[in-house]
Amino acid sequence: MAAPGNDEFERKQNFSLQWATSTPRERRAMLREQREQTAPQSTRRSYVLVGVFLMTAAIAGLVKAVAAKEPVSTIVLFAVAILFCGAMAELSRRGRTRIGFSVLVVGMIGASLAETFQR
């Protein structure tokens, strides 16, 4: 919660004052402007969540593979998948969403091809 004297509080207060005194057309413009400001932040958060979710799934698969005494190559592929998911989450957290997503896609394609060729 923003406290009085805080820049965020003043920004919200100014926004509500402008909202109360504006026409519907101006209100739509204000909402559009606010959505454009928060779009990168929400993209970063969603990419971090996707990376963490996929990493959790890969960890569960790794535990399952170890319990089933799968070959070492399968366990290594799960570890590589965990690495790429973690890289995506970290890069996205730092604002490098395109690079993070590219790393994940290329890594998963590589892991899939490696699994196909190992059989």
Image: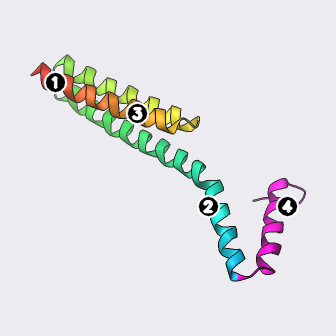
Residue 34 image point, x, y percent: 67, 62
Q: Which residues are magenta?
A: 1-23
Q: Amino acid at mark 2?
A: Arg
Counting residues from the N terminus, which is met first, the one under dot 2 or under dot 4?
A: 4
Q: Amino acid at mark 3?
A: Ser
Q: Is residue 107 left or right of residue 9?
A: left
Give the vertical position of 92 relative to 22 (above or below): above
Q: Is residue 27 left or right of residue 112?
A: right
Magenta-drawn stretch, dominant element (helix, strand or loop): helix
Asked whether 59 falls inside the magenta stretch, the response is no
- Which residue has dot 1 on it? 70
Counting residues from the N terminus, which is met first, the one under dot 3 or under dot 2?
A: 2
Q: Residue at x 63, y 55 (%)?
A: 38
Crowding at dot 1, Cα within 10 Å, few <14 / some 14-19 / many 20+, comes out as few
Cα distance between the residues tagged 4 and 3: 39 Å
Cα distance between the residues tagged 3 and 2: 25 Å
Residue 111 image point, x, y percent: 26, 26
Q: Residue at x 47, y 44 (%)?
A: 47
Cα distance between the residues tagged 2 and 4: 19 Å
Q: Amino acid at mark 4?
A: Glu
Q: Quadrant of residue 12?
A: bottom right
- Which residue has dot 4 on it? 10
Q: Which mark is residue 102?
A: 3
Cα distance between the residues tagged 1 and 3: 29 Å
Q: Residue at x 78, y 72 (%)?
A: 16
